[in-house]
Structures are given as C-alpha cells and as structure tokens.
Image (cartoon, helix red, strand yellow):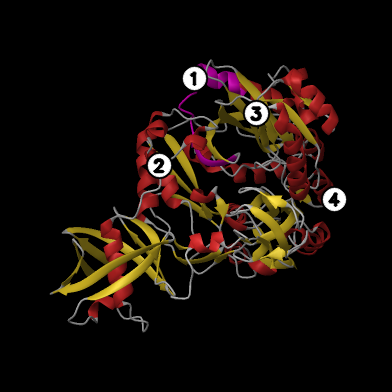
Amino acid sequence: MRVLIANRGEIACRIARACRERGLQTVAVFSDADANAAHVEACDVAVRLGPAPAAESYLNVPALLAAAEAHADAVHPGYGFLSENADFARLVIEAGLIWIGPTPEAIDLMGDKARSKQAMREAGVPVLPGAEGDADALIEAASTVGYPLLVKAVAGGGGRGLRIVESADQLAAALTSASSEAAAAFGNGDLMIERWVPRGRHIEVQVLGDEHGSITAVGERECSVQRRHQKVIEESPSPAVSWALRVELENAAVAAALACNYVSAGTVEFLLEDDGSFWFLEMNTRLQVEHPVTEMVYSVDLVACQLGIASGAELPDPISDGAEGHSIEARLYAEDPAQNYMPQVGPILRWDPPDNVRVDAGVRAGDTVTAHYDPMIAKVISWGTDREEARRRLVTALRDAPLLGVKTNQEFLIAVLEHEDFIAGAVHTRWLEDFTGWQRRASPGLDAVAAVLLSLHDPTGARPWHSRGEHDWPITMRREGEDVDLRVAPRGSAFQVGDVEVRCLDTEAGFAVCVDGVRSSATFVREGRDLHLAVVGLGRGVWTEPDPLDRTPAEVAGDGRLRAPTTGKVVRIEAAVGDALEIGAAVVVLEAMKMEHPVRAAVAGTLSELRVAVGDQVRGGEVLALVE
C-alpha cells in the first residue's frame, strides 16, 4: 500500500517514518516554498501542488485528489489543513481510496461546536453553558451566559477565532474580529459563545476507535501552558489528575467518542476546575500535535494504530501495558515572545537537534522559515521516570542545542520550564498572561564574548581568535535596539573586555570560551553585520555592528511611519486618511502564519497616507502608512 500524506513539516515526516517502519511506501505533496523541504526527502515520491500560499497548494483539493489517485492507495491528512474537512474525506473515499481518519459524519458532528455540544449533553458529558447564532443572537444571549465569556469559532481550532470578552462593551468588536479570523483560517466565520473559566486547566484524553465498534482511552495530557490560545508545553500524565479523576475523564471521553461512532485516533478536550469538576470543550477528530507525550508514557505508536485501523484491524486489548514515567513536550516556534509572540521569518543558520530527547522536526539547518505556514519549527519531547526528571532533561536539551538565525522562543521555553509554578504543577490556561520577567538581559560576559568575535571576525572563515593585533580597539555593538560600547584588549592568549576576561578555544567538540575562568561551550554564526551567539550558562542573542546611517528604533517609531512587524497579508484597514489617531490605535491588520496582527500608531496624529489595501502582501519592515 502507498500512502499519500496530505500535509507538510514535522507531521509529514512523522507519518512517513511510521509508514516506512511498516513497509508502506509514501507520497509527499509540496508547494513551491517546500520543494526542498525535509518532508519531501522523507518520502518515496513527491508531487508538486502549486504556489506557496496554502490556498493554492495544501488546501488545493483537486490537486491533492489528482496526486492521490495517480500515486497512492490511501490518504493520511496529518493535522491542520484539511485534516478535519469532512468534504475532503468524502471525496477521498468516493475516489476509492482509503481514508486514514474518522468518518466524514464524525468530522461533521464534532467539527460543529454547537452540534457537538448538544450531542455531548445527550450523551451525559458535562458541557459549559453557552449559545450559538448570529451576532445579534449572541449579544442578546451574553447576559444569560455571563461575563467573562469566550467567543469561539464554530469550525476549526488552534486558537483561531477565539476572543476572551470581559464586559458587554467589548463583545461587538470581538465578534467582528473573531469572525474575520475564523473565515480566513477555516472558510467559516460562524461563532458561538460560552462561559469562560479564567483559571481552568486544559486536560485532554486520547481515544482510539476501530471499525468493529471498539473504543478505548489512552490516558490524559495537560496542555494548560498556552499563549494566545495555542499550546506551548504539554505533558502526560497531568500533575493535577488523580487516579480516580483519570477514570472519570476517560469514561467521559469514551462516551463522547461513542456518541459519534468514532473511528481512528482522536482527542476529547476538557476544562478542569480547581474543585475537580470538568467540562467538555471539543473533540479534535485527528491526530494532535502533542500526541508524542502519550506515546512516550504508554509505549504506543498512535500513527501505527491509525494505519492498522484504516486497514480493518481490531484494536488490541489492552492497547498498552499501562503508563510508565512522565513525558513533557515543548513546541519550538519561530516567534518573538517579547513582542506578543509575533511570528518570525528567516533562515535557520545553525541547529544541531539534541540527541538526549525525542525531536520531531520538519526543518533542518539551512532551511528558511517562511510566512506562509505555521511558525512551529519542532517538538522537543523528553521522558523521565518521574515529572522532575523529564523536566530537567527537557531543559538540558533546549539549553545545549541552541538554534541560531531566525528568532525563536527557545529561551522563553527554558524560563517556563524553570519557573517555580511550573515545577509545582500550579499552572492554568491564563498563566502565561502574567508570566513576566523571563527576559534575561545579556550578561557582561556574553557581551564581552560577542565583542571579541565581532572584532576579530575573519570573513575567510578562519577561526577569528587566531588573527589579532597587538593593540586594543573600541567596538560599538547593537543588542536588542541598544548600543553597547566596549573596548577589546589582547592580554597574551586572552582578551580583556572591560572587567571581563575572555579566552576562545578550539576543542574536539567545536568551540568553547573561558569567561573569567569559567569554561562553557559556545556556538556562533556571523551573517553580514549580525553575530548570532549562544554560550551555555550565559544565554544567547544577536549582536549587530551598527551602520552609521541607521536610525535607532526610537527615531524610527517617532517619525510616524507604521511598519509591518512581519511578512504577511493585509486583511483589514481600520482607519482612513484624515482620521485623528491616538497612540495605540489600530490602522492596518495583517494576517501572518494564520493569526491576525494589528499594526498600531506609535505616535498621536493624523493619518496622512495609507500605502496598502486589503489583499496586499507586505514584507516585514515595509512602511504601511504615515501619521503626521
């Protein structure tokens, strides 16, 4: 049997690996942006779908069906894209191909959050109070549901089309924004509202169902550490779930799956309150991003289970010998947590994935993260005999394998994992909103190493510390928008930079530095005027030799020019030329990597010029509008 994987990135690589282990051939699909991607190389055959935008490639149903009919016997949708599109599943089945997933009827039912909640009520699964309907109906029902409430897209997931509304005066704007984002992400702008539990925990249960009517639950995962309603850290088992509560959750998940005659792998998501009560949120009719933590704890291959179920096999009883140990997954994203998790684009200049943990990745050093797709680079998954061992292993893996080039959330992940609340298991779905102080300013030692490397860089590629003069020299670097003035002075085999002594060493493992007598491994890449540097124990960052013609960020912000914070597409214009604007007023809204990003006025004044229109593609840093 040959399986077409209707997806990309790390999930396509993961599915290809499971197929290969079972002697199944694989067919990759790719856009022009992914012609040389890792998932293309991981498969036996690869078929071009179209240009880079997902709508013209990975969401191009005719092209996918043509590729499947010509080259495959079965289709695995992965997650995201068309994985929960019942019409696509029907077309695959009607074409005589094997659909590796749930029935279209189950996708339809559980993909409609309003219908699914009604089905759960009838099945005896606890459901939060809420309402469905058009904007007027939702505004009218809101007083009954109560505030705070959650505006939620009826279709889709992944945080798109979700808005927290604290009071009635915020509701109309939230409905407009959420509907627009949901329509762009899922092709369906319908919304619902439900009671919002501010400090709930996100608990989900893995379920598997076969074509013979057997349904089983495989433990729970906790995914409470979220930003912008998207998961960042996941783990299994949950530190908040007792054995008795686990039984209740699994029974409720099985009841939910039975209500839609579920087949294949799926996940039932619940909101857990402090008193132990829990509420049905939704059922994801697909494999989840976080499925590896369940695999690590229960020693089960969920993709292999999907393949077996699709071939007509019965689920083994039991599916696993039981839980052993603890597993934690961190999602490594190309994003800037300090700038509201703004997606980033750019090259991966250097990255050697850690070898002491599991890494599910769809990119490699030398690849470029584009604005066309989700910004997740990889999943880093640890296992330990207990939660603390798994946590320490994950921290070590992230710290010792820095990714240089495009900005990522790597340091942020380490800070989360080392926070006392996470160590104690005392987190909830809004915990990250109050997570501050994690940004460590570059230490004098790290600045000193950067100064040495920038001063002595040899563009021929030779080790820079082997070619130094006898005299000290000044150097100005820019780090995080601030100028740093230092003086580098040779001192025999070392350098004196202010009060810090730096020695650069060649070792069998690569490169190391001694900073004030403390030796650490280091990694750096010089790209133009930028130095990307990571030193174990000191941190990482990017230092730039400033161009004298450049202006400071403050000067740029003060000139009234509104620049795109990232590459993306203009989806809304919120102001007109001539409008008076206050600081922070939204002018243009961009869509990048499936999320909306408002561009706001940095100065008060009058909108004098608008340089873009809805539908325009813009580059990061491009001037969008002028405010006088």
Label 1 belongs to which residue?
243
Instruction: Indicate which disc, 1 or 2, sits on the residue closer to the N terminus.
Output: 1
- Residues packed near mark 3 inside 10 Å, few (<14), some (14 to 19) or many (20 plus): some
What span is in magenta?
230-250
Question: In x, y percent, where is residue 532?
Answer: 40, 65
Residue 569 or residue 51, whichever sits in front: 569
Query: How packed is label 2: few (under 14 Cα within 10 Å), some, or many (20 or more)?
Result: few
The disc labelled 3 sits on which kind of residue? Glu
Q: Is residue 107 left or right of residue 523?
A: right
Judging from the image, what secondary structure is the residue with disc 4 in? helix
**What's the distance in space between the residues labelled 2 and 4, CA to CA?**
51 Å
- Which tag, 2 or 3, sits closer to the chain's start? 3
Look at the numbered disc 3 and give the secondary structure of its residue.
Answer: loop
Mark closer to the chain start, 1 or 3: 3
Q: Which mark is residue 437?
A: 2
Give residue 615's position: percent from left, percent from top. 77, 60
Kind of element beneath mark 1: helix
Q: Earlier in the sequence, mark 2 or mark 4?
A: 4
Count of all numbered marks drawn on residues in the image: 4
Residue 318 at x, y percent in the picture: 57, 29
Residue type at mark 1: give it.
Trp
